[in-house]
Amino acid sequence: MLVFDRVTKRFGANTAIDDASLTIRPGVITAVIGPNGAGKSTLVNMAAGSYCATSGRILLDGVELQGLPKYKIARVGLGRTYQNIRLFDGLTVLQNLEVALVPRSLPRLIAEALWLAPGGVAEARVTSLAVLRRLGISHLAGREAGSLAYGQQKLVELARAIVGRPRALLLDEPAAGLNHGETDELKAHIRALRSPDLAIVLIEHDMKLIMSVSDEIYVMNRGAVLAQGTPAEIRDNRHVQEAYLGQPGAMEHIETAARGRRNRVRVRAGEGLAWGRA
Ligand SMILES: Nc1ncnc2c1ncn2[C@@H]1O[C@H](COP(=O)(O)OP(=O)(O)OP(=O)(O)O)[C@@H](O)[C@H]1O
Ligand SMILES: [Mg+2]
């Protein structure tokens, strides 16, 4: 269980997260939605140790994460993907996963010695390959991450986030920039990840994806939790729609924003992806 307990985060005069409390339960997929700047990524960045909360507690299975370095947070059981892909472009796909398990900065012998099981480095390779197979990208294992298409890089990020068998998995806009087919594939992977001992947080603007895979939804607005409920409750919550952007039909605005984001991503990536929802 991942708990944000009355968390506040200030950047100077800007309060990005304002006394927010969320409980992310294992066994279900919890979506976090909200307009641009609502504070969704800030939640992930605080949990993963990129930012320190100004006040409040963030607990994973009862362990306070605030103040721990990133690698310890990962070891406690937190896996995350980034809104903007962060892979080691010059390393192979397989190496990108292995470094999540065995710090490459360590000489091999020391890594072997520190690793939990004997022959750990070899074991890391086997584990990494198994995860790549699971996501249908084992044929990319030897390719340089930087040479892959955008959609493939997004899958490698997902692979890297799950290779350490996290207890909480935080996905920050995993579908952004993906085409129709890739989004469907991602949806199947996310569904397949649902398991009794994994708490999944899905941040997305793609409302179709959110409504079809999530069990529970938190709506964030200006750093605060505006509403919480099942997809049906949130969809039918007129209060959410009105408060969200100040008018009914606000959910469609989010989808429009998501489409705009996709188009921007395409321009940046310079790839001939097909945008089925334009
Ligand atoms: N490193 C930072 N320094 C200063 N302000 C920041 C920083 N990171 C985030 N913020 C601010 O915190 C607020 C929340 O940003 P955040 O990125 O969490 O929003 P978001 O909900 O993820 O938005 P989006 O949907 O656009 O990704 C914004 O006002 C943003 O400008
Ligand atoms: Mg964000």
Image (cartoon, rainbow, N blue to C red):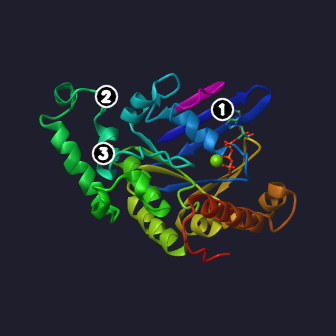
* Mark positioned earlier in the residue sequence (1 or 3): 1
Query: Callout 3: helix, strand or loop?
Result: helix
Q: Amino acid at mark 2?
A: Ser
Checking the image for residue 95, the label placed there is 3
Q: CA distance from mark 3 to mark 2?
A: 13 Å
Task: Please state which of residues 243 and 134 is positioned toward the viewer in this rendering.
Answer: 134
Percent coordinates x, y for residue 39 in the rendering:
68, 42
Query: Callout 1: helix, strand or loop?
Result: strand
Q: Amino acid at mark 3?
A: Gln
Query: Quadrant location of residue 267?
Result: bottom right
- Per the image, is 218 magenta? no
Number of other residues with Cα within 10 Å of mark 2, as a class: few under 14, some 14 to 19, many 20 or more: few
- Per the image, is 51 magenta? yes
Q: Which residue is mark 2?
A: 105
Give the farthest residue toward the left.
118
Q: Which residue is mark 1?
A: 6
Region of the chain picked out in magenta, as a range: 50-58
Observer-side mark, 1 or 3, equals 3
Q: Amino acid at mark 1?
A: Arg
Percent coordinates x, y for residue 231 in the rendering:
63, 64
Picture layout, residue 132 above or below residue 42? below
